[in-house]
Amino acid sequence: MSVPNPTSLDFTAPRRLTGSASRALTSWHATSVSVLQEFWQALLGNRITLTPAQVDSSVAQKAQQALPDPGYGVLLKIGHDRFDGVVAFSSRIVLTLVSEMLGTLGDAWPENRALTPAEQSLFELLLGEISRAMSQGWPEVEPLPVEMDQLIVRPLRSRIFQPRENLVRIGIEVHTPVGSDTAWLLMPQAGLTSIGINETAIPTAPVQTASPQIRSLAESLPVTLVVGLGSASLTLGELNRLAAGDILVLDQSASAPLEAKIAGRLQWLGHPCRLGQRQGFRILASAKE
């Protein structure tokens, strides 16, 4: 009788984020990528698209070994505690993005080489939009502080994290006319805990179930959902002088998600869309997550 091989278990691997922490991180990642897509369109046009990829956990030594080499990255300072985060790109995708900005992209991956000073400046513009997208994509009323600290050449060789530090590794698929590649975001699990992305223990309480009649009645009650486009502050004199054709500058960025509220409380973040002849609202993140 054959005996199956035992399953190999790595007891040194960090505990994966599960439950509420995993949902919160995945939601933030998806919203940030959607916002970054809009920011990059202003610099790159419509031929470059982004999609969220896998989210997993690893120790720093193992996670950094998966970073592209040669490549370029950016060191981020995240949250009020300014913990470190790193976003890394392969050289070929960096050269592709810069070539698209310059209008010189051909039908194949550009030949691998170092960036010129002018090309590096263009790439830093794209990196700056990453920190802005992560800040705007944060699913809270106040944006999360995320700052671009410095450009990193060959992030594989960087020593930003301690070798045994527990990290989360988040992928961003970059689709271009010449092919697709993956950029990687590394953040420490301890840093995520400092901004509220952790496994929170929720005390259990006795479950009281409503009768089917009461539940049916409650679910039939109308609720008004308000999607806010933005706000503006005016003096009474300016308000009195408003006339047809005037334009108000709102405090809301054109690329930032809109807020959907019920009774004044934020419930969802999303972007406007069109459904036939009517306006729509596509939900990107939920307050429940």
Image (spheres, rainbow, N blue to C red):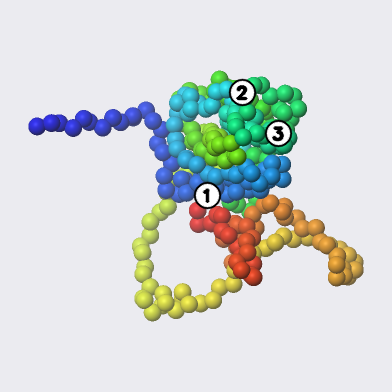
Image location (x, y in percent) of residue 122: 72, 33
Sort mark 1 into few (<14), some (14-19) or many (20+) by Cα contacts within 10 Å. Answer: some
Residue farthest to the front? 107
The local crowd at label 2, few if under 14, some if 14 to 19, many if 20 or more residues have their Cα within 10 Å, is few
Q: Please tell me which residue is depicted at 56% across the width and 55% down the height of the picture.
A: 284
| Residue carrying label 2 | 112
Q: Nearer the viewer, residue 179 or 114?
A: 179
Other-residue count near label 3 (Cα within 10 Å), few / some / many at <14 / 14–19 / ≥20 = few
Label 3 to label 2, Cα distance in Å?
Answer: 15 Å
Please provide percent x and percent y for residue 91: 60, 27
Which mark lies nearer to you, 1 or 3?
A: 3
Residue drawn at (58%, 43%) of the image:
50
Q: Residue at x 30, y 31 (%)?
A: 9
Give the SS element for disc 3.
loop
Residue where numbered disc 1 is placed: 27
Residue 150 location, x and y as percent? 67, 28
**Labels 1 and 3 touching (C-beta < 8 A):** no
Which residue does the numbered mark 3 point to in the structure image? Answer: 104
Observer-nearest of 177 and 157: 177
Amino acid under disc 1: Ser
The quarter of the picture where residue 87 lies is top right
Give percent across and percent down for residue 217.
44, 79
Whole-angstrom CA distance, mark 2 to mark 1, is 35 Å
Q: Nearer the viewer, mark 3 or mark 2?
A: 3
Disc 2 or disc 1, which is closer to the eye? 2
